[in-house]
Image: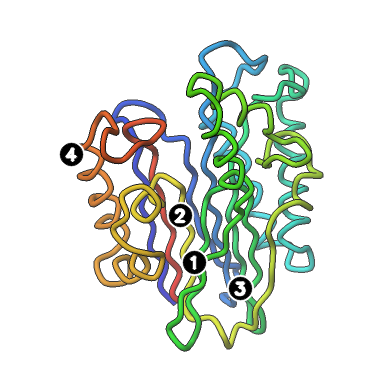
Amino acid sequence: MRIQSATEPGTPGLPNEDHAAAATPASGEGGALVLLDGVTAPPEPVGCRHSVAWFSARLGGALLELLVSRPEMTPASCLAEAVGRTADAHRDTCDLSHQRTPQATVVCARWGAETVEYLVLSDSVLLVEGRDGAVHPVLDTRLDDLRPAARRLPREERAAFVESRRNTPGGFFTAAADPAVAALAVAGTRPRSEVRSLVALSDGLGRWVDTFGFGGWPDLFALLIADGPQAAIDEVRAAEAADPEGAKHPRGKTHDDASVVLAEL
């Protein structure tokens, strides 16, 4: 088994709101990975004294610990428990009912002797390489599904339209303060014998595919295997720097936090 990871803030000197980690149990059998992409808070106060980076680290740490120490729990149950623990850590000091209380996208996977379990919530990505070399992306497309409708609106109304559908029925979902969101994640299980590698990545690195169009998910996977996680992040940073205003490649912000965890089983 080999595990590699890399994470880089979008802007040097500002907090990295991604959280990427992996662990193996004391028995040495199996392991787990988590990757969270914190949702950048709006400039106005949202009723929480904690930063998005604090939230991502707290939730990601709790989720990874549960995945490794509680194999009888499903990844969705682990996420629900981790969301509840994190909410309990600041519900006495913060307003967790605000729609933009600190929150994050989630990717996690756990592997043992017999199975590989995984979960994806919102627009971070999990790539699963089969024993035959085929690469299968696991995607939660609900945010992307809203974008065609948003593009039909005047530009100044698009962000508000998407925001109004955050964590609402018919919209898209992120992990915030409600444990019930875990049941809405895209989840699955595969035999361990059918899985060679797993890659979790935040949408800051997903730009390699869906913003800059360097290739498809299998092409990005091949780059990660051949040259390592940092090489892929470097390619995204170079493309961002070459188009700082987003004239050729429109995007919400010039740079974004970029993270990846690669586990070769």
Place residue 24 in its image quadrant: bottom right
Q: Of circles 2 and 3, which is in front?
A: 2
Residue flagged by tag 2: what amino acid is it?
Leu
Residue identifier under label 3: 111
For this view, does 85 lie left or right of residue 233?
right
Residue at 72% x, 30% y: name it. Answer: 89
SS of the residue under disc 4:
helix
Q: Of circles 2 and 4, which is in front?
A: 4
Q: CB under 8 Å between callouts 1 and 4?
A: no
Label 1 and label 4: CA atoms lie apart by 27 Å
Instruction: Determine if residue 265 is in view.
Output: no
Give the residue furthest to the top: 44
SS of the residue under disc 3:
strand
Which one is earlier in the sequence, the residue at label 4 or at label 3? 3
Residue identifier under label 4: 242
Residue flagged by tag 4: what amino acid is it?
Ala
Residue flagged by tag 3: what amino acid is it?
Trp
Which one is earlier in the sequence, the residue at label 2 or at label 3? 3
Q: Residues within 10 Å of mark 2 (few under 14, many from 20)?
A: many
Residue 172: image location, x then y, percent: 67, 42
Q: CB under 8 Å between callouts 2 and 4?
A: no
SS of the residue under disc 1:
strand
Residue identifier under label 2: 201
SS of the residue under disc 2:
strand
Residue 198: image location, x then y, percent: 49, 69
